[in-house]
Amino acid sequence: MKEEVKNQVLRLKAEHGITPGLAVVIVGDDPASRVYVNNKKKACELVGFKSEEYALPEQTTQEDLLNLVKELNNKQDINGILVQLPLPKHLDDKAVIEAINPLKDVDAFHAVNVGKIMLGEYDFLPCTPAGVMEMLHAYDIPVCGKNCVVIGRSNIVGKPMAMLLLHENATVTICHSRTKNLSEVCSKADILVAAVGKPKFVTEDMVKDGAVVIDVGMDRDENGRLCGDVDFENVKQKCSYITPVPGGVGPMTIATLMKNTLKAAKIQNNL
Ligand code: NAP
């Protein structure tokens, strides 16, 4: 995906003199957020985007953050704006997302973009669920008519993930912390997507033989090592496909962000 974006950027530069630009805003010094932001910057370099980082101190006020977003909305050379979540507790992330111009909202978190996704008429898809769909397509894993179970109902992952699977004619079940008989529900899934945020939460008894298991989780195990929501070593014996953590959904999320930023640049330049 990154190669494809890179080639399109070369063409955009040569034919129209346009270099897509992504602004990443990070507030505070959360180490995980810092890693994600660095990875996004590296990806921008690789595909030939202009990237700008705005690293603001933890004590940044809502007003200052909103002013920065407004400034970026008006910058011609910035096509995508990404505010790294979570924000420190005193800031209202909903208000910040709503302040982003929907055409520059390359995370697709703005209410306008969320609404468009519900209607199936979108400019951008949220990066993590869209990256998962790309993976399913790349491995020719059929979705139509399959029983898909998504564990997690966040606005960022669970809900849009369910919607994208539904758009491709899956029968979708969304599970959450109040779901009864979670193991039983999960064990009926042809495709199981875990977006819970709890290390090794999905165990082999929750997985049907031959199922496809997508692990969105980015957690820390008992030794502080990065791991997913799925007990990979045990579950992998049972399923037909499984995504590793690290090296699965994470890089796909970033590749999709690059794709969205390229699309934003094209839309904003009427191409
Ligand atoms: P989140 O907002 O905390 O949502 C977690 C969801 O899991 C909630 O809907 C919650 O249910 C549900 N849940 C919690 N405990 C449960 C239980 N015991 N049984 C069933 N469901 C339960 O998290 P998120 O933002 O969606 O992220 C989920 C994970 O994905 C995290 O590890 C995050 O780091 C990772 N992530 C990875 C990427 C990537 O690029 N790979 C991107 C985004 C997020 P309730 O709604 O009932 O509370």
Image (tube, rainbow, N blue to C red):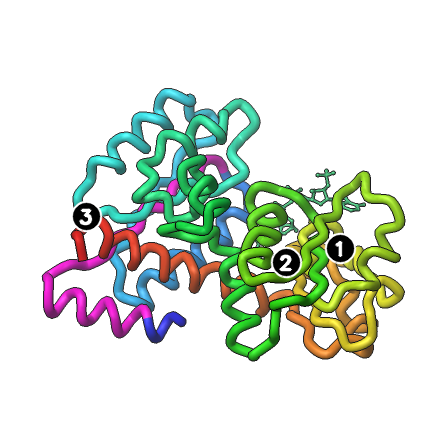
Q: Quadrant of the C terminus?
A: bottom left
Does residue 18 lie above or below 112 as drawn? below
- Measured as percent of width and height from the top left, residue 141 is found at 60, 76
Residue of label 2: 216
Side of 11 where 63 appears, left or right = right
Categorize mark 2 by other alpha carbons within 10 Å: few (<14), some (14-19), many (20+): many
Residue 59 visible in the snapshot: yes
- Can residue 27 be found in the magenta stretch? yes
Location of residue 207 with respect to 240 vertically, above or below: above
Q: Which residue is mark 3?
A: 77
| Magenta part of the chain | 5-28
Decide if residue 228 is in sight here: no
Pair 1/2: label in front: 2
36 with respect to 192 (left or right): left
Distance from label 2 to label 3 (Cα)? 32 Å
Q: In this figure, which residue is indicated by the disc labeled 1?
A: 199
Above or below residue 116? Residue 212 is: below
State which tag comes first along the sequence, 1 or 2. Answer: 1
Image quadrant for the N terminus?
bottom left
Q: Can you tell me whether the CB of the residue at mark 2 lies under 8 Å from the nearest atom of ligand 1?
A: yes
Distance, label 1 to label 2, CA atoms, is 11 Å
**Residue at image coords 36%, 51%:** 123
Q: Which mark is residue 4?
A: none
* Nearer to us in this view, 169 or 131: 169
Q: Residues within 10 Å of mark 3 (few under 14, many from 20)?
A: some
Label 1 and label 3: CA atoms lie apart by 40 Å
The amino acid beneath tag 3 is: Asp
